[in-house]
Every structure is written in C-alpha cells, then in structure tokens.
Amino acid sequence: MVTHIVGNRPQFIKLAPLYHALERAGYEQNIIHSGQHYDENMSDVFFEELGIPAPYVNLQAGGGSHAQMTAKAMVGLEKELMEKQPKLVVLYGDTNTTLAGAVVAAKLCIPAAHVEAGPRLHCKENPEECNRIVTDHLSDILFCPDELSMKNLQVEGLQEKAYRTGDIMYDTYLEISDKIAGNGALEEVIVMTWHRQENTSSRQRMESILHLVECLGEKVICPLHPRTRKCLMEYGLWEQAQAIANFEIIEPVGYMEMVALMQRARLILTDSGGVSKESSYAGAKCLFMMDVEVWEDLTQIDWIHKVNPETEESLQEALRYAQQAKRVPQEDRPRFYGDCHAADKMVQAWQEKHFL
C-alpha cells in the first residue's frame, strides 16, 4: 500500500500523474486529505478533473495557526497510518500537511518519499522553508524538480537519497493543455492569483496590490481565493476592488480552467510559488508579489520579476516589465524542469531502492 498525503491545490496536481503511474505499475494506493484547503471549489473539483479517486478520509485540519493546523494533521495522520500500515508514504511540496506527514511517518518508521524536494529560499522566517528542510531531512527518498534543488541537497549532505526527476507538475500541465488546445484566438489578458498571508494580512498591503492592478491598465482576471475575498471585505476594500474597471474577479476555478486561463495570459501576476513556475510552461512572464526568490533559475533570466507594490520604484519597474511582456512560443520557453516523465522516473527509483 502506498499512501499519498495531500492538502492543497498544488499537491492535488502533483499527485495525479504519480497516482496514474503507480496504478499502471499495479500498486495499491490510498489518499489522505488533511483538509488544509477545505473549500469545495479549491479541493473536490481538482480530483474530478485530474481523474484521481476521492480521498478515503478528510482530517479537517484546516484553519487556525500554523501550530494548530500541523498538530491537528499529525494527530489524524498518526491514527490513519497506524491503522493502514502503508509500505510507503508520499509527501508533496512544502505545506504544514507535508511537515505533519514527515514527522508522523518518521516516528512510525514508515518510509517517506518527498516530491519536489530541494528548493530553498535561504530564509527561515518563511514558514514553508522550515517545512521543506525538515521534510527533506526526515524523508527516505527525495525527488528534485531541477539541478539547483539537487545542489541544495548536496550542500546539506542529502545527495545519496536524492534523484533529479523533473517537475511532476509539468507532467500534468502538458496533459491538460493538450486536452484544451485550440483556443489561441481568445483575447490575451493578465491572469492573477492572490492568496498568501503576507499579501492579505494588512489593509495597506491589500490597497497597494489593488493599486498595482489598476495601474496595469488592461484586463486582469483573478480567480479569487476565499481567504482573500474575506480579507478584502474585513478591511472594507471589497467595493474598491469591484470598482476597478480592468479588474475581473471570478470564483475559484478548477485546474483545467486555470490552465486555459494561463494559455491566454500575456502576463501572470501571482504570489504563488507553484503558479510562478507554471508560468514558464504557459509561455507567460511573471510578476511575483513576494520578497523571496522561489525559482532562482527563472529569476536569473528575468522570467520571474519580483514586485513590491508598496514602493513606488518597484511599482514603476513592474509596470515597465508588464508593458514589455509578450507571450513566448513553445520552442523558446525555459527548459529547467524536466521532460514530462517525472512520475515514471519516481516509480523506477522506488523499485530500484526496493521501497516497492
């Protein structure tokens, strides 16, 4: 039995191709959903679109502080893993769910694999950085999306259990984009996602982001995260957001709809590490609303351009960047993250190491 532990949108996407690869190889599997993202629009629809069976349990660990969320997930995971006794646990990304799974699996002596191991911000004030480091050190096998992640793990002495497989999200992205090909005649837009706590925890920050959107001066489509909508309302900014003529707020979308939006994008404005990386698959440059460097390879070639909308200098730089951004043809897009066969490489590595 292989147990997948997931809890948010990017983890659902990473799960799909690996589940299918293990299914083809004949392995029994189950899925535990921590409930970290508990809104139906942010969870159930992804499983349906990606052809993944529903989790057999939802731990309902969403809400509360980092400690509360992680603790609730650990208590629930311990119960389930002790009962099911899987041969291998698969962890994804860098969330509190990932951390909880790594700690519980280690204490129960169940081998764990970490998908998307090795990225580093070199900033321990970032909560996800702590999750990544602990998970990589506790896991038994590490799957890296790129060469830079492999080098990071080498510095930490973890190279013996690390494999460069490429980005598993690329597997899913290409599969979905092939299904929805043929919409090239649609109007090009700016696509926005906005959900990070750093960008929703103060009225000033949210006002500055709305100002950035307005200054862009062309249609910005934003599938708005429930928490962001709630914060806009609490700060009395909801009517201001709706009044911005070029700002089109829509309900959260499924992954297939998100890929369709990204294929129309001339530019992507986001605070999501996953979406910023996916921008290179979609052929749209990225304005990144965080003061951290998530994907150094893409930042170094200025595919990802950081913006702090609270400073005038950064705002003006971002507007110049946005004005010059154009869609990039498939043949000219960066190729840092593999060849669309990450899931099969992971299964092969497990078999070679006799985890399966």
Image (tube, rainbow, N blue to C red):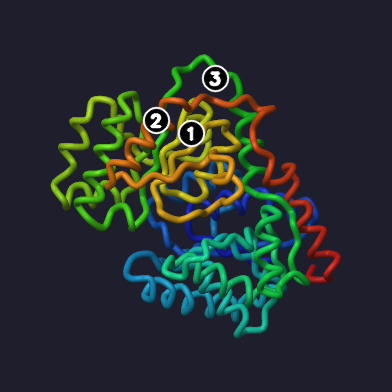
Residue 246's label in the rendered image is none
Q: Secondary structure at mark 1?
A: helix
Q: Residue furthest top?
A: 185
Question: Circle 1 is placed at which residue position?
Answer: 257
Q: Secondary structure at mark 3?
A: loop
Visible in this render: residue 310? Answer: yes
Question: Circle 2 is placed at which residue position?
Answer: 320
Callout 1 crowding tier (Cα within 10 Å): few <14, some 14–19, many ≥20: some
Which of pointers 3 and 2 indicates the residue nearer the eye?
2
Question: Measuring 74% from the left and 66% from the top, which residue is drawn there?
Answer: 162
Indicate the quadrant containing the C terminus: top left, top right, bottom left or bottom right.
bottom right
Q: Quadrant of residue 4?
A: bottom right
First in residue order: circle 3 vs circle 1: 3
Position of residue 211 measured from the top left corner of the image (x, y, whole percent):
24, 37
Position of residue 84 measured from the top left corner of the image (x, y, whole percent):
63, 75
Question: Circle 3 is placed at which residue position?
Answer: 183
